[in-house]
Amino acid sequence: MRTILVTGGAGFIGSCFVRGCIADGFARVVNFDRLTYAGNLDSLASIADNSHYEFVQADVADRPAVERAFAEYQPDAVVHFAAESHVDRSIDGPAEFLRTNVTGTFELLDTARAYWSGLAEENRQTFRLLHVSTDEVYGSLGAEGRFTETSPYDPSSPYAASKAAADHFARAYHRTYGLPVIVTNCSNNYGPFQFPEKLIPLIILNALEGKPLPVYGDGQNVRDWLYVGDHCEALRTVLERGRPGETYNIGGDCEQRNIDVVRTICQIVDELRPGLPHAPCENLITFVTDRPGHDRRYAIDADKIQRELGWHPRHNFTTGLRETVQWYLDNPNWVERVQTGKYQRERLGLAPRS
């Protein structure tokens, strides 16, 4: 069984990837995670005692720690999720995004290059480093069109800029050194175990508790939504059959306006939790000051990964969202534990412009 070093494996997407790999016997997994506010080992409780799973608490920007992990576990592949990922937090504190997303990615790439260079030729040929990125690096779309793998980068937020820089470093390490790097850029993920500062879990939990449902600006911003399990299946497909040096865009083909997402969640909560004293939940919708630099529309053209690698999403937005709402209804203890720290669903990202 091959070994995969997964950075950020206690986060939302990373933990889904790890759980899937262990459950399906896809690989032995070494989860390398700093456990910041969004990293949660409760999301991995189902596989914590599995003999094919190891956890290392460490920072991807800590070069000696990264080197120790490579030396001890001798990975056959690396999947790099570790990142600060919330746009609002990047507005309030961009320095941490630079440190983790750019410096951390550089330290990982440079350590991987040295490790890969010392492998036997057969292992060098099969080694892969999969760098997981976002569609936000492309900036904002107009009313028409979709992002392709050749769309120019035009990041709007400090978060997107930090991921764009990381993408460039990843590609440069392939072109300069031959390191077998593959880059993926995904659309907005949703599903179980997502930290509640993100739109969908925030709206679900506030709707259940009768709290205001904040909608930025006029609510007309459009996102392409991708169920997290479908994304992780795509990543495994890329790891198995993707070509080094290539980029693959991963999308759910589910464009939705933010206001429509919120209204749909309200309808599902009203149905699954009848009798809430504040029902209908749609009455809780509150339009709030828009996020600075808020991109108007994202949409992913996933034709390349579908055509070349045969991946297609399994979930449509209706079924995926219903499953997600039901999961949060069924797992209040998980929600309570992840909110025991500083974050209490307050509004972030309101740093004034100078």
Image: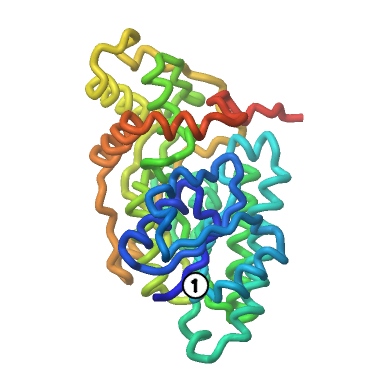
Height in image: 136 above or below 197? below
20 or 296, which lies in front? 20
Q: Is residue 149 left or right of residue 85?
A: left
Which residue does the image show at 57% across and 86% down from the upper left? 119
Height in image: 8 above or below 282? below
x, y percent for residue 263: 33, 24
Badge 1 element: strand
Height in image: 284 above or below 132? above
Quadrant of the drawing holding the C terminus: top right
Outermost residue on the top side: it is: 277
Which residue does the image show at 30% across and 12% down from the upper left? 276
Amino acid type at circle 1 is: Ala
Q: Is residue 302 visible?
A: no
Height in image: 182 above or below 34? below
193 or 50, which lies in front? 50
Which residue does the image show at 58% across and 78% down from the upper left? 179
x, y percent for residue 151: 50, 58
User: Within the image, what quadrant is residue 89 found in?
Assistant: top right
x, y percent for residue 264: 30, 27
Q: Is residue 82 visible?
A: yes
Q: Is residue 11 left or right of residue 342?
A: left
206 or 144, which lies in front? 206
Q: Which residue is mark 1?
A: 77
Q: Is residue 124 left or right of residue 92?
A: left
Q: What colour scheme governs how the chains and residues are painted in the rendered image of this protein?
A: rainbow
Outermost residue on the bottom side: it is: 121
Q: How many marks?
A: 1
x, y percent for residue 181: 53, 72
Which residue does the image show at 62% across and 51% down from the upper left? 34
Q: Is residue 325 left or right of residue 53?
A: left
- Near mark 1 (Cα within 10 A), the count class, few <14, some 14-19 or many ≥20, is many
User: Within the image, what quadrant is residue 330 found in?
Assistant: top left
